[in-house]
Amino acid sequence: LNLLVCTLLKIIVIVKHVN
């Protein structure tokens, strides 16, 4: 579960940087 949350947070950060 913790790994999933960490992955989701990284994806959100990448998406924010792209936008």
Image: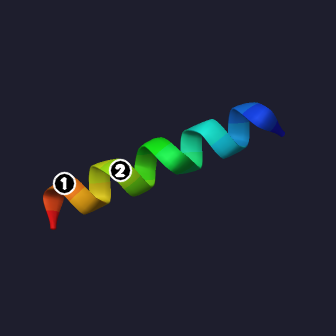
Instruction: Identify the residue at image location x=78%, y=35%.
Output: 2
Determine the image quadrant of residue 10: top left
Q: Judge whether 6 appears above or below 13 on screen.
A: above
The local crowd at label 1, few if under 14, some if 14 to 19, many if 20 or more residues have their Cα within 10 Å, is: few
* CA–CA distance in space, label 1 to label 2: 6 Å
Residue 8 numbered mark, or none: none
Look at the numbered disc 1 and give the secondary structure of its residue. Answer: helix
Tell whether label 2 touches label 1 (CB within 8 Å).
yes
The answer to whether 12 appears left or right of 17 in the picture is right
Mark 2 lies on residue: 13
Which residue is at a point 70% across and 41% down the rendered structure image? 4
Q: Is residue 3 above or below residue 14?
A: above
Q: Residue at x 42, y 56 (%)?
A: 12
What element does badge 2 sit on?
Answer: helix
Residue 11 versus residue 3 in the image, above or below: below
Which quarter of the figure has residue 17? bottom left
Q: Which residue is mark 1?
A: 17
